[in-house]
Image (spheres, rainbow, N blue to C red):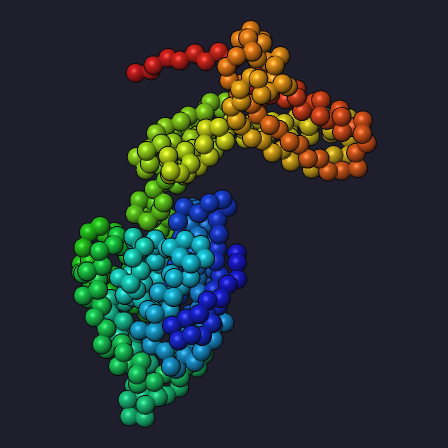
Amino acid sequence: MLAVEFPGSAGHGLAARLEMPEGEPRGYAVFAHCFTCSKDSKAASRIARALTGSGIAVLRFDFTGLGDSDGDFSNTNFSSNIDDLVAAAEYLEQEHRAPTLLIGHSLGGAAVIAAAERVPSVRAVATIGAPSDPSHVTALFDAARESITTEGEADVQLAGRTFRIRRQLLDDLAGQRQHERIAGLDRALLVLHAPLDEIVGIDNAREIFEAARHPKSFVALDGADHLLTDAADSAFAASMIAAWAARYALDARAHAAAEAPASSPGTVTVSSTTSGAFTQSVTAGSHRFLADEPEPIGDDAGPSPYDLVLAGLGACTSMTMRMYADRKGIPLERVTVMLRHERRHVDDCAECASDADAESGSRSGMLEHIAREITMTGDLSTEQVESLRVIADKCPVHRTLAGAVHVATSIVG
C-alpha cells in the first residue's frame, strides 16, 4: 500500500492510498467513499485490499475537506466531489495507468456515475448502496434545512461528527441531472445494494437499474447494512466486482493470461489470443502469463520466446549454484545471472568452434550464441568461486541447450 497525495479540484492536497497487487496490475480503479466516510472506512479499505487479490490496483482518497485531505468541507459540494474524482483519475493516468473502473459507495456511487463521462479511459462503473438522486443525502440534515436555507449555513451532526453545511451544497445537489447521466452512461454498470439498507432504500437501486442501458448487472448484498460493517459483506462485494470487472474493465491481455487453459505439472501450454497479432497465453502448472514479440513487431505484452529461453537458463543456473553452495557449505549469499542471445558467424566466435564442429562438422554458417555473466556475493575464496563457475555449466537447462535436442511434433484433433 502506497500513501500518496495529489492536487484536488480546488488545488488542495488530497490524501490517498494506492493498493497495488503483486505483479503487473490487470487494471486500475478509483474508489469513492460515502458522504460521511473517508478513504479509511471499513468498506473502502476492505474492498480495495480484496480487489488487489484479483490483480486490480485501487486508488482510494479523501474528498476535499474530509479525512486527511486539505481544504474546508463546508466549501465543497457534489460538483466538487466529481471534480476530485476526475483529478484522481488524472493522477493515475500521469503516474501509473489510466483507470478503467470507477467504484463508489453511497453518495460516492452517485459521484462515480457523474464522473464517468469525464474520464474517457473508464469502461465500467460499480456502485454500492448508491442513491439514484444525489439530493437523497439532504435527508440526513432535514432538521437543519430551515436554518441552512434562511441563515445560509448550519452545523449538523452526522455519524457522531459535526459538519458545517452551507446552502450552496443544497442548491448544487438539487441541480444535478443524475437520471440523464445514468441513461447516457455508455459504460458497463454494476449495481450492488443491500435489500434491507435503512439509509439508502433498495428502491434507489431499482431506479438506477431501470434508467441504465445494457450492459448492466445487479447484485443483492443480502443481510448487509449500508456501511458494509461486516467484513464478510465487504469481501462478497469485492468478489462480485472483481468477477464482473474481468469481463468489462480489465486489461484484455492480462485477462487472456488469466483464462489460459490449465497445465499438468511438467507441461507448458501455449495458446494464441485475440488481443494481439502475436500475443500468447502461457500456462505452466498453476502459473499464467503472456508471451509476445517486442514492438513494433508485436505488442510487447510479455517476454519474447528467446527471453523465456534465457530466463529458463538463468533460473536454472542460479538454482544449481545455490544447491551446490548449500551442500558444500560455501557462504554464497546472492547470485545474479545476466544473459544475452545473439547469432554470430562461426568465424567470429572462437570459443564456440568446438560446438560448431560437433554440430555441423564445419566452420561455416551461423551459431546461436548466449553470453552469460554471473555475479556472486559472499565471503568466497578464489577456489570457491571457480567451483561455482564450473557447476554453473552443469545446470540441467545448460546441458539441454548445449546437447542434441529432438523435438517431436504431432497434430492433435
Q: Is residue 235 visible?
A: no
Asked if 324 appears above or below 255 in the picture, the reply is above
Q: Going 52% across and 58% down the picture, which residue do you hit? A: 2
Quarter of the picture containing the C terminus is: top left
Judged from this view, the residue extending furthest toward the bottom is 151
Q: Going 42% across and 62% down the picture, which residue do you hit? A: 91
Judged from this view, the residue extending furthest toward the top is 361
Q: Residue 323 appears at what percent x and percent y?
A: 69, 27
Q: Going 81% across and 26% down the picture, which residue do you hit? A: 383
Q: Can residue 328 be seen in this view?
A: yes
Judged from this view, the residue extending furthest toward the front is 347
Q: Going 52% across and 26% down the picture, which residue do you hit? A: 342
| Among the 4 quarters of the image, the one containing residue 280 | top left
Q: Residue 178 appears at what percent x and percent y?
A: 22, 68
Q: Residue 202 appears at what percent x and percent y?
A: 26, 63
Q: In this view, does 362 lie to the left or right of 279?
A: right
Q: 152 or 27: which is nearer to us? A: 27
Q: 360 or 35: which is nearer to us? A: 360
Q: Residue 144 appears at what percent x and percent y?
A: 33, 86
Tally the numbered discs. Answer: 0
Q: 187 or 368: which is nearer to us? A: 368
